[in-house]
Image (cartoon, helix red, strand yellow):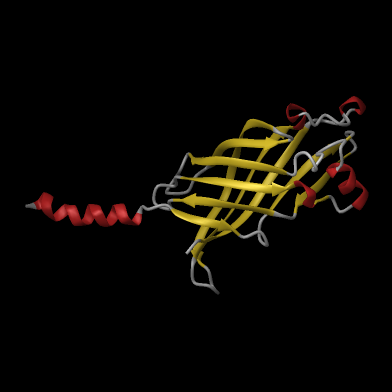
Amino acid sequence: MKSLLLVPALLAAAAQAAPVTYEIDPTHTYPSFEADHMGMSYWRGKLNKNVGTIVYDKTTGMGSVDVKMDLASIDFGLAAMNAWATGKDFFNVEKNPSATFKGRFDGAKAGVPTQVVGELTLNGQTRPMTLTVHQLKCMPHPMNKRDFCGADASGSFNRDEFGLGAGKEWGFKMDVSLRIQVEAVAME
């Protein structure tokens, strides 16, 4: 008899553990980066246009991330640098207009993942990349009353591995830090 009483409780727990799909809010999501400038300083920039989805199960901490970044929206804060970066000598946005990061949540502690294990596709090449999750929080959106989540994650990659070695011969370091701060709203 006791086992029959547990069935509704187990079904209720399973229903609560359902993953939710969230649409990335492009007005609150800005992948940003730091890149060396001849060992003298670091140039910082961001990508102003992006789209994507996050699937997240708040009970288990499992889920996935799919972010597409528009490389033509790169913003160093200097128009000449933006034009060079999007031109044929670097990103060549006519040939490769976007970069993507796709991954799955991993290492959950109390329902919150500690990392996103995935792949970065840049310049037509795909390489493994892991992002460390520094923060993830979900709550009801104060205006539209749907669930929404925000997170901050970072990692690094070697741009030379993606065929983006410009400046290497002048002493530019090839390591780039990538940080993605994201907000996403549950899809209806």
| Relative to 5, residue 120 above or below | above
Residue 161 lies, with reference to residue 33, above or below; the image says above
Which residue reaches farthest left?
A: 1
Q: Could you say where residue 170 lies in the image, as x and y percent from the top left?
A: 92, 28
The residue closer to the viewer here, 121 or 172, is 121
Q: Residue farthest to the bottom? A: 143
Residue 43 position within the rendered picture, expressed as x and y whole percent measured from the top left: 84, 44
Name the quadrant containing residue 165: top right
Q: Is residue 24 left or right of residue 33?
A: left
Q: Is residue 162 above or below residue 98?
A: above
Looking at the image, residue 41 sits to the left or right of residue 105; the answer is: right
Q: Residue at x 88, y 34 (%)?
A: 39
Residue found 82% across the figure and 30% down from its top: 173
Query: Residue 146 appears at what percent x and percent y?
Result: 49, 67
Residue at the outermost front position? 94
Q: Residue furthest top?
A: 169
User: What residue is rendered at 75% in x and 40% in y?
Assistant: 96
Residue 137, image x, y percentages? 52, 57
The quadrant holding residue 85 is top right
Quarter of the image for residue 125 reads top right
